[in-house]
Image (cartoon, helix red, strand yellow):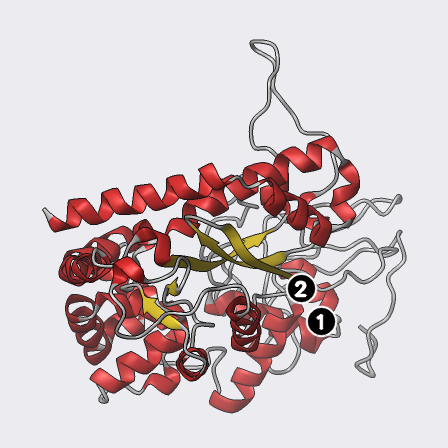
Amino acid sequence: MPTDGRPRRRRATETATALRPVDGAGTATGPAPLPVDGAGTETAIALRPVDGAGAETAPALLPVDGAGTETGTAISLLLKATAPPRPRRACPTTAMFSEQQRLHALHLCEEGYSVDEVAVIIGCSTHSIDRWRRALAATGSVWQDPEMKNSHADAALRNDNLVRAVKLLVESEPVAFLRDHVDLLVTLSTYYPEVDHRYVSSATVYRVLRHLGYTRKRVERLFLERSDQEQREFAVMINQIPLRCLVSVDETHTDGGDVYRKFGRTLRGDRCELLDHDPRTVPRTSTVMAVSMTQGVVWSQTVVLGPAQTSDDWRLFLQCLDTRMNKYVPGLPWALQPDACVVLYDNAGIHDEAGDAFMQENGIHHVRLPPYSPNLMPVEGVFAELKKHVQDLFYANAQYLEKPMQLLAAAVGRLTLRQISGQFQRMAEMVAELLL
């Protein structure tokens, strides 16, 4: 280093200084310098955390794979003099860096190495170095919380109020954990206000669930045990309505995972590989469909959107569906009611109160399913047949890849009345089982 404190470029023939901790006066306190050869090839040593006296305190850090197995040689401490600065990159190890490693990185920055060079030497990202530097300036330590240090990941599990609130909520209202994440956090703060939900994310809640041993299947089983009574009550009510009067309505999505077939044929012992377009290039479509036992597809609406259809799309669909359905006559016995006069729909997010008010104002008789009851929705089985037709059409004509609207329209046209009526019969069998 020059006396003015500025870093200078090393030539390939000069001896590179070993990277060591330094004291306040800038005197190196670690091991002796290491040479490089005339071709600029590094003489590598293992990167080891050191104490204040420069003594090694831990074994060499080796590159590891996802399972934590060492897969390579020791990380080199020296850079080639002619190598350009490395770009920002993620940390190659899965463990957190020790306090000695963090201090070592900051000492290297003080010696004149650039942040990009230090990131390559330590094996961390430049964002981590910036974070350590800010923490040192704010708290006098390389940790954001000097008392917690590496224990931040387990902070949620030591929050007794949060753990108790999650445990009580999953036992009393398991449906809350099957809803949207925002609804989950709102429910948690409503039932247990002592938990400050502003600082609780959905990932934190699911971490506590895993700690308590609650998997998604276990939560679903708890909910189904509580929803049996609701499904029985719904079965008693729906059993009074003839199947011909129902119009089953729901939404489905189609993307690259639905266009390509998941299985193929090949010789025994040979692997079957799909050589075709990238399925991620297939536009994602959202289709709302209404089917009837006697009329088949009453109405279908497909749009190409990013996430999904909205409540505005739902009301637009209802407005079009109203012109294709028959009108329910209040007070008339069900035996005399016309076909396709009752809308059967589920609890999707787009089925909001504004849609219910629209149906009420326009005389559309509607029935809502109990929560999480796809077994009682005939159109769910129709969607399975629809996606089979989507795959057949795509393999017959690859031009459908760029025409998702025409693809869905052609697939809907292939649905037969027999396929649709069979799904209504399946629903009738499920209702009969609930009434036993």
Q: Which mark is residue 221?
A: none
Q: Mark 1 points at which residue?
A: 115
Along the viewing direction, whichever of 46 and 217 lies nearer the viewer: 217
Amino acid under disc 2: Ala
Residue placed under numbered mark 2 in the picture:
119
Name above or below for residue 97 compared with residue 402. Answer: below
Question: Residue 228 placed where, x, y %?
Answer: 16, 57
Q: Which of 279 and 84 is in front in this view?
A: 279
Q: Can residue 136 be seen in this view?
A: yes
Q: Is residue 220 left or right of residue 271?
A: left
Q: What amino acid type should be assigned to the residue bearing mark 1?
A: Val
In screen coordinates, is 352 left or right of 42?
left
Tell me the CA gap for discs 1 and 2.
6 Å
User: Foreground: 208 or 294?
Assistant: 294
Q: Position of residue 178 (x, y in %)?
A: 32, 64
Q: Can you give x and y, in whole percent of width and height, for residue 336 in the image? A: 30, 61
Image marks 1 and 2: residues in contact by CB distance under 8 Å:
yes
Query: What kind of element bears circle 2?
Result: helix
Residue drawn at x 41%, y 42% is: 421
